[in-house]
């Protein structure tokens, strides 16, 4: 029963013992760059591997000692101390990396939002340009239509004026012709009247 409680007691003693005081006195190093955070995590991993290797060697050697259990407890205590220290070094590095990833996620969100805004602005600009071109083309079509109507009206007026002038000239010619015919008729009438007078005794 005591043997089963030993690991638990060791952990409690370590948490409340000199190591706890040491942690309170010397806060864990806080990385300032991703490289420092990665280096701290590699160091913590190396400490854990070394603790496991040393613990395996020490525990194997304990079976050659007289006080086997005491030797194993001491080896376990050293392993736990090293693992706690590794964790103490690793924790701020992991927190830094989490914050860094969170910042990257936020930056990516901002980048995508900016790209979306820029894309929407480009789309709106193209739509506005298309509307402006369509409006300009519609204005041009309307201008040409009005110009055609204006020219058609001018042509109609010219034809009407030409036709009126032609009729006027025809009327003038008809009047002149009528005048000449009337003059000739009067002259014939006078000639005929003169001939009748000459034949009378």
Image (tube, rainbow, N blue to C red):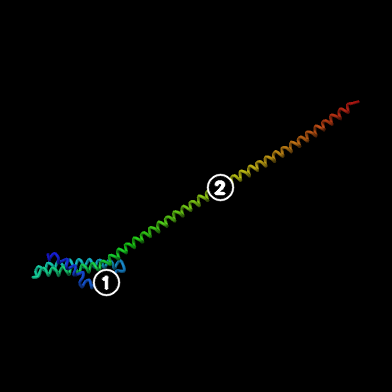
Near-viewer residue (178 or 87): 87
- Measured as percent of width and height from the top left, residue 7 is found at 16, 66
Of the numbered discs 1 and 2, the one sitting upstream in the chain is: 1
- Measured as percent of width and height from the top left, residue 136 is found at 52, 51
For the N terminus, the quadrant is: bottom left
Question: Is residue 54 visible to us here?
Answer: no
Dot 1 alpha-carbon crowd within 10 angstroms: few under 14, some 14 to 19, many 20 or more: few
Q: Which residue is depicted at the point 83% across and 30% down? A: 189
Which residue in the rendered view is the most extreme toward the bottom? 25
- Measured as percent of width and height from the top left, residue 62 is found at 11, 68
Q: Is residue 38 left or right of residue 63?
A: right
- Measured as percent of width and height from the top left, residue 45 is found at 22, 66
Q: Nearer the viewer, mark 1 or mark 2?
A: 1
Q: Which residue is depicted at the point 27% across and 70% down? A: 29
Q: Secondary structure at mark 2?
A: helix
Q: Which residue is depicted at the point 46% across and 52% down? A: 127
Q: Is residue 147 left or right of residue 179?
A: left
Which residue in the rendered view is the most extreme toward the front? 1
Q: Which mark is residue 142?
A: 2
Task: Measure the C-alpha gap from mark 1 to mark 2.
Answer: 81 Å
Dot 2 alpha-carbon crowd within 10 angstroms: few under 14, some 14 to 19, many 20 or more: few
Check the image and report above or below for 179 versus 128.
above
Near-viewer residue (191 or 24): 24
Q: Which residue is mark 1?
A: 27
Check the image and report above or below for 148 versus 5.
above
For the C terminus, the quadrant is: top right
Q: Secondary structure at mark 1?
A: loop
Near-viewer residue (22 or 163): 22
Question: Is residue 164 visible to us here?
Answer: yes
Check the image and report above or below for 198 versus 134.
above
Q: Which residue is depicted at the point 29% across and 69% down? A: 30
């Amino acid at each position: 029963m005591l043997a089963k409680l030993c690991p638990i007691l060791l952990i409690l003693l370590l948490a409340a013992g000199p190591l706890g005081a040491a942690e309170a006195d010397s806060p864990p190093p806080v990385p300032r760059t991703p490289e420092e955070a990665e280096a701290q995590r590699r160091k913590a991993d190396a400490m854990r591997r070394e603790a496991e290797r040393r613990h395996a060697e020490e525990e194997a050697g304990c079976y050659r000692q007289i006080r086997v259990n005491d030797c194993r407890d001491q080896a376990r205590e050293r392993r736990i101390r090293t693992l706690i220290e590794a964790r103490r070094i690793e924790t701020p590095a992991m927190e830094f990396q989490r914050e860094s990833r969170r910042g990257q996620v936020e930056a990516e969100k901002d980048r995508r939002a900016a790209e979306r805004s820029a894309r929407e602005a480009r789309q709106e600009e193209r739509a506005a340009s298309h509307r402006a071109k369509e409006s300009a083309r519609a204005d041009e079509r309307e201008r040409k239509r009005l110009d055609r109507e204006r020219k058609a009206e001018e042509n109609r007026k010219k034809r009407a004026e030409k036709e009126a002038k032609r009729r006027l000239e025809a009327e003038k010619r008809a009047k002149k012709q009528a005048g000449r015919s009337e003059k000739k008729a009067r002259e014939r009438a006078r000639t005929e009247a003169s001939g009748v007078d000459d034949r009378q005794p």
